[in-house]
Image: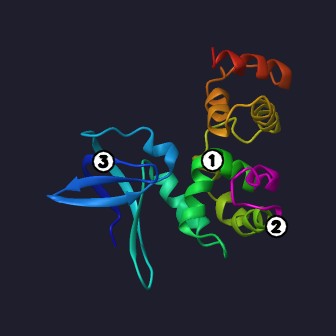
Amino acid sequence: MIASLEGTVAATYTDHVVVVAGGIGYKVLMPPSSLSNLNIDDRVFLHTLLVVREDSLTLYGFLTLAERELFEKIITVSGIGPKLGLAILSTLGVEHLRNAVVSEKPDVLVRVPGIGRKTAQKIVFELKDKLSADLADIPAGTFTDVNADVLDTLVALGYSIVEAQAAIQALPPDAPEDVEERVRIALRYFV
């Protein structure tokens, strides 16, 4: 299988990128959140997964190995295909998805377009054991109820989940554990 691809970005689209490597242009589907980081003529290294179906060979690409590994786990859930897997990763990101699954919070997954309550519960149920082994890879402070409450507050204020995650990751290590104070500090990220 094709595990990685290194080359030059020839074109970017809303759901994929064309990477030229060895004179061949590869169409690589990616999460939109990752695509926004790529520009034409950029040199890129992608961790890839080739999905073989009866009628197609589709290459999916990720900027980090953690994204690809989580994507592989997501698509093992019955009823979750690669397109929905990309939507989940793009909307939530690696850390927040892991946090939602390990903390058993399917409400977070319901925010992803195309995911209903039952599907969210199934994802949490099927991935919980698979992701709990990965906890050592997650930065300290990610798995706190306080940060989950801060994220929920920022999303309720109109920020996207990705923006809210970035603000939470930018919090100083000595930030107080009070939700309201953490929200105030996180809002400074957007100024």
Within 10 Å of the Cα at label 3, are there few (<14), some (14-19), or many (20+) other Cα atoms? some
Identify the amino acid type marked 2. Lys
Q: Nearer the viewer, residue 153 or 179?
A: 153
Label the magenta part by its dominant secondary structure. Answer: loop
- The residue carrying mark 2 is 118
Within 10 Å of the Cα at label 2, are there few (<14), some (14-19), or many (20+) other Cα atoms? few
Q: Which mark is residue 82?
A: none
Percent from the top left, x then y, of residue 23? 14, 58
Q: Residue at x 62, y 38 (%)?
A: 162
Q: For this view, does 3 lie left or right of residue 145?
A: left
Percent from the top left, x then y, of residue 128? 73, 63
Identify the amino acid type marked 1. Thr
Q: Earlier in the sequence, mark 2 or mark 3?
A: 3
- Element on which disc 1 rests: helix
- Element on which disc 2 rests: helix
Identify the amino acid type marked 3. Ala
Q: Is residue 124 above or below residue 43?
A: below
Q: Is residue 138 above or below residue 123?
A: above
Q: For this view, does 122 lie left or right of residue 47?
A: right
- The residue carrying mark 1 is 91
Quick one: quadrant of the N terminus?
bottom left
Q: Nearer the viewer, residue 11 or 120?
A: 11
Q: Is residue 128 above or below residue 52?
A: above
Q: Residue at x 63, y 45 (%)?
A: 95
Q: Disc 2, disc 3: CB below 8 Å?
A: no
Q: Earlier in the sequence, mark 1 or mark 2?
A: 1
Q: Give the spatial CA distance, label 2 vs label 3.
A: 38 Å
Percent from the top left, x then y, of residue 144? 77, 38
Taking the magenta stretch, the answer to whether it contains residue 116 is: yes
- The residue carrying mark 3 is 11
Q: Give the spatial CA distance, label 1 vs label 2.
A: 18 Å
